[in-house]
Amino acid sequence: MNADTPRLRPPRHRVDRRAVWWWTSQSLIITVFLTVVPVVPALIWEPPRAWFLLAAALIGGCGLVITVVMPQWRYRVHRWEATDTAVYTSSGWLWQEWRVAPMSRIQTVDTARGPLQRVFGLSSVTVTTASAAGPIEIAGLDHALATQVADQLTDTTQATPGDAT
Amino acid sequence: MSSPDEHVPLSPTDAPQEPDVSPTTAWQRLHPLSVWAGALVAGVFMVPVAIVGTIALVMVGQPLWAPAPLPATVAFLALTTYLDILRLRAVRYRVTAERMEMRSGIIAKAYRSIPRERVRSVDVAAPVYARIFGLCSVTVGTGEKVGSGSDQLQLLYVTTEQGEWLRRDLLYRGAPSNGGVSSEGAADPDAPVETELARLRPRWFAYAPATTATLGVGLGAIAALLGANAQSGGRGWRWLSEQTGLPNAQEVSSFVMAQALLVLPLALSGLVVSGVVVLTAAAVETWWDYRLTREADGTVRLRRGLLTSVSLSVEGRRLNGVTLHEPFVLRSVGGADVRAVATGLAAADAQKTSAKSRLSPAMPRNEARRLAADLMRTSDSPLDVPLLPHPRAALRRRFTRAGVVTVAGAVSAATLAWLHGLVGAAWWTVVHEAEREIIAVPLATGVVESSPSWVWAVLAVVIAAAAFWYAVGSYRALGHGLHPRYLLVRQGMAVRDTVALERSAVIGWRITRSPFQRRLGLADVAATTAAGKGMYAASDVGLGQGLDWADQAVPGLLEPFLVRDGESGESRS
């Protein structure tokens, strides 16, 4: 490899520390739900009870491991940055993703907060471009900060010429 | 190579009678005959059904009810036609200097309005039942949501002249239209000149059957016959063999087993021939009278179709690139087709979108490349740019996948071999019975019984060879490159797509890495865009290589987020 090989530097800002708890509780809810699914038939049917309980134990075990590992991992990966010219984010844990969108091509900027995010005082900022590849999302920002970022992005977008397509 | 001089300038042969339809600002209605077009279609399908119903009722012994279906159908048709008339009366549309507007709805009123500069494509289609009445449908695509509905505005139906005028006027970006466009005929000398990019050559139809579907279509036809036979509990075949003196199922199957070397190739060629016939017919229907032209204002216009004639216009500025599409079978006979990477061509789902973006039938590869270059209006074709290969690690990833397939193939072959050893067992007769129920001529179980057990080993080896051959092919398909105005990516073994995307149409980057890619130093670097599929990726490119490419393709966008090993990454702030 030559010395000039570029690498991606991580975006400047981390998401809020509380996002770890948000991801943990999210993962825990899904784990509990998926574990209960095989437990129900185990309570009803006598003969295959052991097999259903085994399945429940396997699912529950995997789910717990993910619940412990995933949020910390995500917290290390999830980052964001907004410059005068572009929005830059990184996300994911096993499968990771970096996205860049120039200000001149941004169509809409929204903030959204699900019920679980609200419990932890968090918000997501969604930045939409004209591409069918989907919006860029910065999930797990402090609510006040998210509003501020969205306002700032909206202002910058409006000040930047371009027809967004 | 074709120079621009070779393009035939066409005279305005079919200049529409525009003075009749020029009052742009007035609200207009759909054509009243469109109701009857709809009624005709419904009638053609429903009246025969009603007649069959009457006959069936008589035969079942319910003669009292026999006269019912026909009047009921007529009443139903009358009702739907009446509702259609109401719907039709409620629809008004107009094209003003700034926007196209449409009002519709009887009870729930709807009003939709598209700014004219947002119009990306105009699709004029005339299905055969509308053509009888001289009508056509007009679909206006915008590439973004209009109000609460889809991103399209559809008129069902208007006269052919009106459709032609809408097509011309909506994409016309010249002087603001105040009805003056209509006088273009003689006054404006260069307005109606179009350049022909491609025209159908009948020998291109030879490429139509070059798809994997050829066998499948034939198989489908035969499966439908067998299915019908099974539905009747095998009576169909028995009846046929009694009537015509054909051998019965047992005789046929023993004959097939005895003469397998003769019968199997014959059956296979029968499949191929029926597939060829069906697919060629479909291609003729779709691509008859195919013409691709560029009009004076840069709009690219596609015309095609035998029964359903289609005319699709895409604003030149919105044609952001071209895909050279080469499915495996077509590629191996030296063919390709050309697809548009354009904004405003989106349809209901991905499959329809890709069907709509087709700009040419399957044609010889060289001609497809020439057409693609003409479409992109570059002196040196972006498709001639040599593409950079991806790192060896990408090949290793594909070998790993091929290895997994090989193991899976070997395991299933071993399982089958084990089952083969149990052929004598009791349940085997059950399988026999089941097969005899499903198809009249039991072949599969017979083949299994008569084949020696080493066949399974051969099967495993064939699967392994195919998997590794596929891996090498798909690695060699990978490539990315840069042209002064376009970026290029190529990938795919089953379907090889070479995409040229305008660099100015890139509206962002998305870099994804799986755990395996991180270990091997690879990444998928994708350009996002408003056009076409929305995202075009260089798969399994070396991370540094891919970022370099992205950085050069759109200078300045990725630059602030890159660190180069030569400098200190932390200094920027």
Image: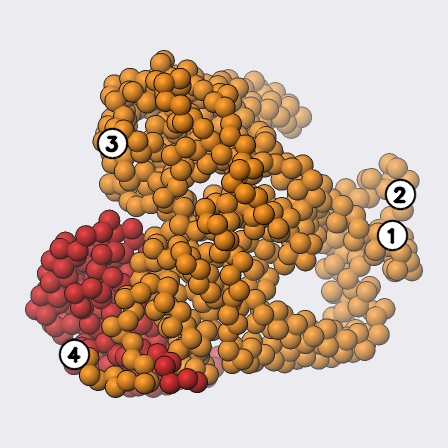
Chain colours: A red, B orange
Q: Nearer the viewer, mark 3 or mark 4?
A: 4
Q: Could you give the CA–CA distance between mark 1 and mark 3, rounded to whole angstroms? A: 69 Å
In the rendered structure, the residue with mark 3 lies on which chain?
B
For the residues beneath circles 4 and 1, the answer to whether they share a chain is yes
Q: Is residue B267 left or right of residue A112?
A: right
**Is B374 located above or below residue A19 in the figure?**
above
Q: Earlier in the sequence, mark 4 or mark 2?
A: 2
Q: Could you give the CA–CA distance between mark 2 and mark 1, rounded to whole angstroms? A: 9 Å
Q: Earlier in the sequence, mark 3 or mark 4?
A: 3
Depth order, front residue of B25/B449: B25
- Contact, mark 2 vs mark 1 (Cβ under 8 Å): yes
Q: Nearer the viewer, mark 3 or mark 2?
A: 3
> Image point 56% across, 37% down: which residue?
B6
> Image point 57% across, 44% down: which residue?
B2
Q: Is residue B186 left or right of residue A164?
A: right
In the rendered structure, the residue with mark 4 lies on which chain?
B
Residue holding disc 4? B573
Residue B437 appears in which quarter of the rendering? bottom right
Depth order, front residue of A118/B403: B403
- Contact, mark 1 vs mark 3 (Cβ under 8 Å): no
Residue holding disc 2? B246
Residue holding disc 3? B99
Residue holding disc 1? B252
Tell me if mark 3 has few (under 14), some (14-19) or many (20+) residues whose alpha carbon lies within 10 angstroms of its own: some
Q: Could you give the CA–CA distance between mark 3 and mark 4, rounded to whole angstroms? A: 46 Å
Q: Earlier in the sequence, mark 4 or mark 1?
A: 1
Tell me if mark 4 has few (under 14), some (14-19) or many (20+) residues whose alpha carbon lies within 10 angstroms of its own: few
